[in-house]
């Protein structure tokens, strides 16, 4: 008789960065670890969160800050969660309507996705609209507890634009962003690929910048687990981490891009043509000049420690929650955020694979403008770049100072 496999029910949103979960199921990585990985495609992040909360899912492809928010008691049905691994870095775009692009281009002297000139141009447009008495721009985000929201608000504030005052932020599911843009319900959006490319290919929007230009190699999605499920089956958790890690390594191989695009294009996953999925996998996006531009580090599935659950990532998200008034800073809240990401589980799970791992669980974010040697289990690891576009750094050991330095946008 064949050995009974552990059933794991996992939800995902149709985005390119769901690929490690998809490939874990499709390419036998989960089966090799004794898992029966059952995937369920969902439309919104709120649905993912709620189905985890009511035990419909054991695990999920989930927004990196969402488990932190759950452990802070934010939102409906807050359910204790943990994050044993990340699902890659990058792959977000800030995409604007054709009408807004025509206003922006008057203030841009180059078209290359650069974040600083883009936000300066946007600030000029916002001021012009204010003088004319025009209504505030409406920008779509995928969820209030998302990297999209925090990075977008961070980027906007550098140009003196206060999200929620100078521009309005509205929640729209990722796959509905292009239609919302086409129907003038929003003027722009921040969402993961392929939806920026879909808007561009359908000629309803223009990609203005990306999260790779705002914060290099920034965290995006993670593998989120219900704490009770993880505690009941720690061996199953480690098996799932190994399966998804092996799938992420497969996804990062250039020779697998065509097959990966074909799998993701299926209706069960993204339900989009290979032509709109392939550019993201090739790290090339179409800019406002109509040309495809290569973007170094736009998407990493496993390379550059992209699956490592850095506690410093969790703490940066926490600072943005405090900054935006979503939670109050306290020792208890800080502990909840810090303990959500679990590199100890990641390390234990990958020990049989002899993977080179960083020697530490937290780092200064934004300090690396290029590749730099880093302490590791075998001494051959390089990290970076991880710079913020404005040159600022986040030192988790000086979190209070960092909070004090941020503009107050919580009102």
Image (cartoon, rainbow, N blue to C red):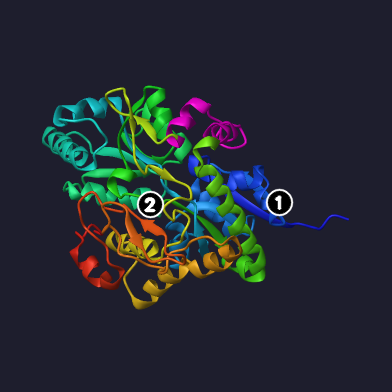
Circle 1: element type: helix
Q: What is the residue that sits farthest to the front in this orientation?
A: 379
User: At 27% across and 36% down in the image, what residue appears?
Assistant: 113
Relative placement, left or right, of 397 versus 342 is left
Give the label on residue 31, or none: 1
User: At 20% across and 41% down in the image, what residue appears?
Assistant: 119
Vertically, is 148 above or below 230?
above
Vertically, is 364 above or below 214?
below
Expressed as whole percent of the image width and height from the top left, the position of residue 144 reads 39, 52
Give the crowd class for mark 2: few <14, some 14-19, many >=20 residues within 10 Å. Answer: many
Residue topped by disc 2? 147
* Position of the N terminus by quadrant: bottom right
Provide the residue span drawn in magenta: 257-281
Front residue of 356 and 203: 356
Q: Judge depth for marks 2 and 1 and give the one in front.
A: 1
State the separation of the CA atoms marked 2 and 1: 31 Å
* Position of the C terminus by quadrant: bottom left
Relative placement, left or right, of 353 versus 324 is right
Residue 10 visible in image: yes
**Of label 2 and label 1, which has the lower sequence position?**
1
Circle 2: element type: helix
Look at the image and say whether residue 14 sits in the magenta stretch: no
User: At 56% across and 61% down in the image, what residue appears?
Assistant: 225
């Amino acid at each position: 008789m064949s050995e009974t496999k552990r059933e794991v029910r996992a939800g995902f949103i149709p985005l390119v960065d769901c690929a490690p979960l998809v490939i874990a199921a499709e390419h036998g990585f989960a089966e090799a670890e004794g898992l029966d990985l059952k995937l369920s495609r969902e439309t919104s992040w709120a649905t993912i969160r709620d189905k985890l909360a009511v035990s419909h899912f054991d695990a999920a492809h989930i927004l990196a800050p969402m488990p932190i928010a759950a452990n802070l008691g934010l939102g409906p049905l807050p359910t204790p969660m943990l994050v044993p691994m990340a699902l890659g870095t990058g792959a977000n775009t800030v995409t604007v309507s054709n009408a807004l692009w025509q206003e922006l281009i008057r203030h841009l002297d180059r078209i290359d996705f650069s974040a600083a000139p883009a936000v300066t141009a946007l600030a000029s447009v916002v001021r012009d609209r204010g003088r004319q008495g025009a209504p505030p721009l409406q920008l779509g985000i995928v969820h209030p507890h998302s990297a999209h929201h925090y990075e977008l608000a961070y980027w906007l504030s550098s140009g003196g634009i206060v999200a929620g005052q100078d521009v309005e932020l509205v929640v729209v599911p990722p796959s509905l962003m292009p239609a919302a843009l086409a129907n003038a319900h929003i003027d722009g959006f921040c969402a993961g690929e392929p939806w920026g490319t879909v808007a561009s290919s359908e000629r309803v929007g223009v990609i203005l910048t990306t999260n790779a230009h705002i914060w290099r190699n920034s965290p995006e999605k993670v593998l989120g687990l219900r704490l009770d499920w993880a505690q009941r089956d720690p061996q199953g958790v480690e098996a799932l981490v190994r399966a998804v890690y092996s799938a992420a390594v497969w996804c990062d191989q250039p020779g697998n891009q065509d097959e990966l695009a074909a799998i993701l294009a299926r209706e069960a996953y993204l339900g989009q043509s290979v032509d709109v999925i392939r550019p993201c996998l090739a790290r090339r996006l179409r800019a406002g000049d109509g040309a495809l531009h290569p973007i170094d580090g736009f998407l990493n599935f496993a390379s550059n420690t992209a699956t490592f659950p850095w506690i410093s990532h969790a703490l940066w998200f926490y600072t943005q929650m405090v900054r935006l008034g979503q939670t109050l800073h306290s020792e208890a809240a800080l502990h909840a955020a810090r303990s959500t990401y679990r590199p100890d589980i990641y390390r234990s799970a990958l020990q049989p694979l002899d993977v080179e791992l960083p020697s530490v669980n937290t780092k200064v974010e934004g300090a690396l403008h290029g590749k730099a040697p880093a302490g590791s289990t075998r001494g051959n690891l390089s990290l970076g770049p991880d710079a913020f576009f404005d040159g600022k750094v986040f030192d988790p050991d000086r979190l209070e100072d960092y909070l004090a330095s941020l503009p107050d946008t919580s009102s």
